[in-house]
Amino acid sequence: MTIQPPEEDFCELGTHQSLPVVLLYVMPSFFLVVLILGLPLNLLSLWVFSHRLRRWTRSTVLLFNLTLADTSWLLALPFLIYFHLDQLYWSLGLPMCTAVRMLYHNYFYLSIFFVTCIGVDRYLAIVHPLRSLVLLGRRKTYLLCVAIWMAALVLSIPVASMTFIHTCPGSNRTICTLYILLSDPQESLPYSIFCSIAGFLFPLLSICYCGLRSVRELRRRPCLTDRHNKQRRLRRVLCAALVLFVLFYLPYHVSRNAAIVMRAVYPDNPASWRPLDLAFALEMCFCSLITCVNPMFSCFIGGQFRKEFHGTFAAMVSQCLGMQVSSDISKRTRMTMRKSGGGRSSLCACCSK
């Protein structure tokens, strides 16, 4: 195994550069906002899945696993926030460093795979409605979800061999490396390209193929009402999936591969890496928003989940507002009683007469 040199971006934190500003201030602030917004949304979604939905369809199972993946990543996010807030000093050891880097990579492809499976599920329900019951029953859907978790884990195993803890020369800063920003791209470049093809390009092509086939099948059906309703639901699913791919997944893979390719093309010129490193760091911040967007994705394509989620959220808000109103009323009542302290004694005196 080749020992990589320390990452220039994490070791050189001069204030005159824009990348350290992103690493030290923008990234932890962004992650903190995502944690504050995303964790309650995903925990509420898990509660709705577990307690409010009695009938689970194939899409429900896939959406539940997507939410579970979001929640698991959000629970590990405080370690990254602490790392960036602590001036990129990593004090938790190599096993935790490896686990956090693998979890980030693993979660990203879990999200892609589950979104793709939701699109394929709609395709099977429309184009092969009877065969889909045999090909993808509820039990097979559970097995598919287990297979997706295992496949994403296997895809992320090479990250462990490219994750190191280094002490920066000239300082005592101990950093948790990120394989994308390693100086030597001998291992990271082929691995990143393979993940981009197997974990992004194939799912994207699958979504496009399933969408085109489903639309063509719906146009051939004679029942207009059923056709229009299913076309509308299909467009909703496909548009939501394509928005996730174009808005989050595509820029992430482009910026990641570009940052590694620049290291391979200009190995002796670290200054040429910085613009693409900056773009990738900003893209990492932006991609973390997907954990907040996925609950909205579940509401957008799941009608029953949307009703239960909105109902539960409205009940929680009204309960909180009701508690606040009752607290204000009780405060006003106590203040009134204090101001009219003699009123009770006079009233009792009148009653005694």
Image (cartoon, helix red, strand yellow):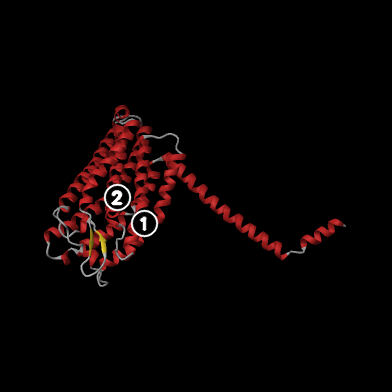
Residue indicated by mark 2: 103
Task: Report the residue that reaches farthest toward the right.
Answer: 353
**Amino acid type, residue under disc 2 in the picture:** Leu
How many residues crowd around disc 1 within 10 Å: few (fewer than 14), some, or many (20 or more)? some
Residue 225 coordinates in the image, percent (x, y) = 38, 33
Q: Is residue 86 left or right of residue 3?
A: right
307 or 290, which is in the foreground?
A: 290
Gap between marks 2 and 1 measured at Cα: 13 Å
Q: How many marks?
A: 2
Residue indicated by mark 1: 78
Q: Residue at x 28, y 53 (%)?
A: 95
150 or 131, which is in the foreground?
A: 150
Q: Secondary structure at mark 2?
A: helix
265 or 146, which is in the foreground?
A: 146
Q: Is residue 352 left or right of residue 98?
A: right
Residue 125 coordinates in the image, percent (x, y) = 32, 32
How many residues crowd around disc 2 within 10 Å: few (fewer than 14), some, or many (20 or more)? many
| Image vertical order of residue 2 relative to residue 63, above or below | below
Q: Secondary structure at mark 1?
A: helix
Q: Residue at x 25, y 36 (%)?
A: 213
Quadrant (top left, top right, bottom left, bottom right) of the C terminus: bottom right
| Image vertical order of residue 64 relative to residue 12, above or below | above
